[in-house]
Image: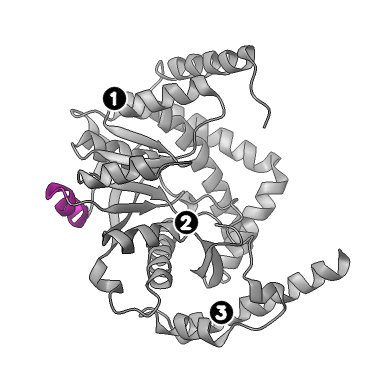
Amino acid sequence: MAKKTFIQTWGEYGAARAAAASMDAFPIDANLRTAAWIGRVVDRLDRKHRGRGQRHIRECFPSWSDEKVRRCHEASIEHLVQLALEVVQTPRLVTPGSWHRHVSIANLGPALELMNRREPCLMVTGHLGNWELLGHVMAMLGYPLNAISRPLDNAALNRWMVDSRARRGLKLIVKWGAVEEMNAALDVGEPVSFLADQNAGDKGIFVPFFGRLGSTYKSIAILAIRKKLPIVCGCAQRVGPGFRYELNVQDVIQPADWADRDDAIFYVCARYVRALENMIRRRPAQYFWMHRRWKSRPRWEKADKPLPASVAEKLRSLPWMTEGEMERILDWTQRDRAALRGSNKTA
């Protein structure tokens, strides 16, 4: 992407600050109603992403009616626009004296126990609910959090974002060349958090996500295994109308859980992706369905070969794997092979 000019950089920055200031003149619930309306308009106008998002929802929930799929996707876009507004207003609204009016804590006990003992851990969430609020609240409650992030293209906006989070104790680590800062944080007992639900490309490890193999980053599992770090899988999801969220831990993966696994990396990746799936199932309208989660395909599908026996064995060894889900994975493998075969013929 071309570097922004001075006028572009500061024009965008000024517009963003002005918009943020104007939002403060209205109650948050009124702003959220407006954001939801904007989301419905965006959903109607953006046919490309609407079609993709609805297709993904239909594939993940095959028993749903077309109307339920349509409404879920529309609600997810409403939520996405509301989220953008909430990110700007969170530092003003969620403070040590007011956070309990907007946030309830369901079962953070396992995570807080680790942090109270100053034991380093990795925290995993996804593009569901309000991932920004999750880090903000943890940092505000006195648990310094380090989040791996991609900087904004606008340097002025990026500085504003970084500074506003740093004032609350949330430190952002740029994802490129993050190893040194990440290790420094872990060495002093501070957790490091990741958004871990995106497609990892051809070099990722393929584990089940809604009954279909999806490319997943191995780096989280490798780091946890090398340093013997627990992995906390959690999220902040909207509960009811308005700016009200619940913080929840879905799973804690301990080093002992993978100690006797033949392929520990596969197991850890599959388990945290399973946790993400379960969190999404709880409130699917708060997930980012437009993302092309299954875009990359494993090498055996590209070669038009069936699922390797070694991979099938690893899948069946997962404690939560059922025959029904295994059949779904095999069915998707055949469908993806056929799709790749067709695309090769027309190329």
Residue lying at 27% horizontally and 72% vertically, measured from the top left? 257
Q: Is residue 173 left or right of residue 12?
A: left
Q: In this view, does 118 lie to the left or right of 63?
A: left
Q: In this view, does 282 lie to the left or right of 8?
A: left
For the residue carrying disc 2, how many other residues have a C-alpha within 10 Å: few (<14), some (14-19), or many (20+)? many
Q: Distance between the residues labelled 2 and 3?
A: 20 Å
Mark yes or no: residue 232 visible: yes
Name the residue tied to disc 2.
284
Residue 296 spot, x, y in % from top left: 63, 62
Looking at marks 2 and 1 on the same chain, the residue that comes earlier in the sequence is marked by 1
Residue 112 lies in the magenta-colored region: yes
Q: Quadrant of the C terminus?
A: bottom right
Looking at marks 1 and 3 on the same chain, the residue that comes earlier in the sequence is marked by 1
* Three-letter residue code for mark 3: Arg
Magenta-highlighted residues: 107-118
In the image, residue 332 above or below residue 25: below
For the residue carrying disc 1, how many other residues have a C-alpha within 10 Å: few (<14), some (14-19), or many (20+)? few
Which quadrant holds residue 338?
Answer: bottom right
Name the residue tied to disc 1.
167
**Residue furthest out toward the front:** 180
What's the mark number on residue 328? 3
In the image, residue 195 above or below residue 61: above
Residue lying at 49% horizontally and 80% vertically, measured from the top left? 325
Q: Distance between the residues labelled 1 and 3?
A: 47 Å
Q: In which quarter of the image is the N terminus?
A: top right
* Three-letter residue code for mark 2: Pro
